[in-house]
């Protein structure tokens, strides 16, 4: 006889197997043990979702800059994972830069893990960093459990994380190919980017043209082919670069800000809209949506890149280039997706299943037997007005402040239990292969 279920969750609407249907989810020891029809299954603890709620798998955000240690005033593991939980995100993968030290050695990874361990409200994995001179460190980082390696092809904005030139990229990707791991690349060609200054957004936009992304993407594709390495392009903003990726085997993500915002709507001096690569015109945005619909873009992640309010002051040349959106990613994408005829199953594919599969996060990204019982309970028709000061992010800087969005996250579950942000954190640190 099978062991007794601990909890059953019943939902009239749940995204299971890529489609919406009524379902009962049986949970045992923090994992999904059974997925059945709505009226089946029983357990000592039975939770019935409201009629206006939909059960989704917890979101998986593989592009989050937590910044701790070293720049914890920008964000930190406590606040970042609180924001994730408040936004229905149950797993994040932390980027290797903006923290000090950067995650480019095993010793630096250990420092970050030690700081994070008792603070995380959701599960957290880590990227390693590929920088000039550390090819010899990649194997040890891989063995220590990072999910792959991040590199830049132009100035990253922080001195601790310099970019790779083409020969260094070739050497690093030859090593990641040998290891069988993923190289993820900030793909802009620095030779085609110029300095920007001033308050008009147009000057900043033209300083980072689509050609800079297309040129860098072509380098990533050619290097992957030369080495046999697995590669992924992060935060694509320029739809013009997509043809270079077709048939290459190199995957690509985009972000909520590129799918929601438009250059035409950025006021002069509104540096809260600054990110790199930049938010482009509405016509480009619609091309990104079309590419998502056809599968040319693989998934959507936040590129949560916060900073203190003072670093966002000044003009478009001086201000920090990053947007904090971890807590808002789901309602941002859902609000825009439903306007274009997409359903919640599409959003789950883009924001949970596909990133988990590409990064090989075992047991994450789906409501399926054997997977972690990580859920987002969403009221998809409930609207709310964004108040940046009320978000869990450490700094209340957001281009979405005052915007009305649709889709309220009412509860987030981690391994079979709702997350209580007033309780002690119970997230885990993840490692590749574990």
Image (cartoon, rainbow, N blue to C red):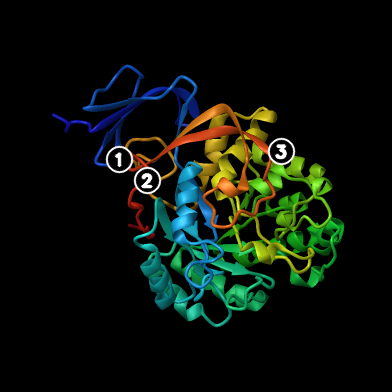
Tell me the CA gap for discs 2 and 1.
Answer: 9 Å
* Tag shown at residue 349: none
- Quarter residue 43 falls in: top left
- Position of the N terminus, as image quadrant, is top left
Q: Earlier in the sequence, mark 3 or mark 2?
A: 3
Q: Which residue is mark 2?
A: 363
Image coordinates for residue 249, horizontal then vertical, percent: 59, 53
Q: Earlier in the sequence, mark 3 or mark 1?
A: 1
Judged from the image, the secondary structure of the residue bearing numbered disc 3 is helix
Q: Which residue is mark 1?
A: 31
Q: Residues within 10 Å of mark 2 (few under 14, many from 20)?
A: some
195 horizontally vs 182: left or right: right
**Residue 227 visible in this rendered orientation of the protein:** yes
Residue placed at 50% from the left, 49% from the top?
A: 83
Q: Nearer the viewer, mark 3 or mark 1?
A: 1
Q: Nearer the viewer, mark 2 or mark 1?
A: 1
Pointers 3 and 2 in contact (C-beta within 8 Å): no
Image coordinates for residue 338, horizontal then vertical, percent: 64, 29
Q: Residues within 10 Å of mark 3 (few under 14, many from 20)?
A: some
Image coordinates for residue 16, horizontal then vertical, percent: 44, 30
Residue placed at 47% from the left, 26% from the top?
A: 53
- Position of the C terminus, as image quadrant, is bottom left
Give the farthest residue toward the top: 39
Tell me the CA gap for discs 3 and 2.
Answer: 30 Å
Tell me the CA gap for discs 3 and 1.
Answer: 35 Å
346 horizontally vs 193: left or right: left
Pointers 2 and 1 in contact (C-beta within 8 Å): yes
* Tag shown at residue 290: 3
Q: Nearer the viewer, residue 78 or 192?
A: 78
């Amino acid at each position: 006889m099978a062991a007794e279920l601990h909890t059953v969750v019943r939902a009239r609407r749940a995204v299971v197997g890529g489609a919406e249907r009524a379902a009962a989810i049986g949970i045992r020891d923090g994992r999904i043990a059974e997925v059945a029809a709505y009226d089946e299954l029983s357990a000592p603890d039975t939770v019935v979702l409201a009629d206006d709620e939909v059960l989704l798998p917890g979101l998986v955000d593989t592009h989050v800059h937590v910044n701790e240690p070293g720049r914890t005033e920008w964000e930190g593991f406590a606040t970042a994972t609180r924001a994730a939980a408040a936004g229905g995100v149950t797993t994040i993968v932390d980027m290797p830069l903006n923290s000090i030290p950067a995650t480019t050695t095993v010793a630096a990874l250990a420092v970050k893990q030690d700081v994070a361990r008792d603070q995380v409200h959701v599960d957290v994995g880590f990227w390693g960093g590929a920088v000039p001179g550390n090819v010899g460190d990649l194997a040890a980082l891989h063995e220590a459990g990072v999910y792959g390696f991040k590199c830049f092809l132009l100035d990253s904005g922080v001195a601790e994380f310099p970019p790779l030139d083409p020969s260094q990229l070739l050497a690093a990707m030859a090593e990641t190919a040998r290891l069988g791991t993923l190289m993820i690349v900030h793909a802009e060609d620095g030779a085609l980017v110029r300095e920007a200054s001033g308050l008009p957004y147009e000057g900043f936009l033209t300083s980072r043209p689509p050609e800079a992304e297309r040129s860098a993407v072509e380098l990533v594709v050619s290097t992957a082919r030369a080495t046999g390495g697995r590669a992924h392009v992060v935060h694509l903003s320029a739809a013009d670069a997509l043809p270079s990726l077709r048939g290459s085997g190199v995957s690509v993500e985009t972000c909520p800000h590129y799918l929601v915002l438009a250059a035409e709507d950025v006021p002069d001096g509104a540096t809260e809209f600054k990110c790199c690569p930049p938010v482009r015109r509405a016509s480009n945005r619609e091309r990104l949506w079309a590419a998502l619909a056809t599968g040319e873009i693989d998934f959507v992640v936040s590129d949560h890149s916060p900073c203190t309010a003072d670093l966002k002051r000044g003009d478009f040349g001086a201000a920090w280039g990053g947007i904090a959106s971890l807590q808002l990613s789901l309602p941002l994408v859902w609000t825009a997706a439903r306007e274009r005829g997409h359903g919640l199953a599409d959003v789950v594919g883009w924001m949970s299943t596909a990133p988990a599969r590409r990064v090989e996060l075992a047991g994450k990204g789906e409501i399926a037997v054997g997977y972690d019982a990580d859920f987002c309970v969403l009221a998809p028709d409930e609207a709310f007005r964004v108040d940046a000061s009320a978000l869990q992010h450490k700094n209340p800087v957001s281009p979405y402040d005052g915007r009305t969005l649709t889709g309220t996250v009412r509860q987030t579950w981690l391994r079979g239990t709702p997350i209580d942000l007033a309780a002690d954190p119970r997230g885990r640190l993840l490692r590749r292969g574990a």
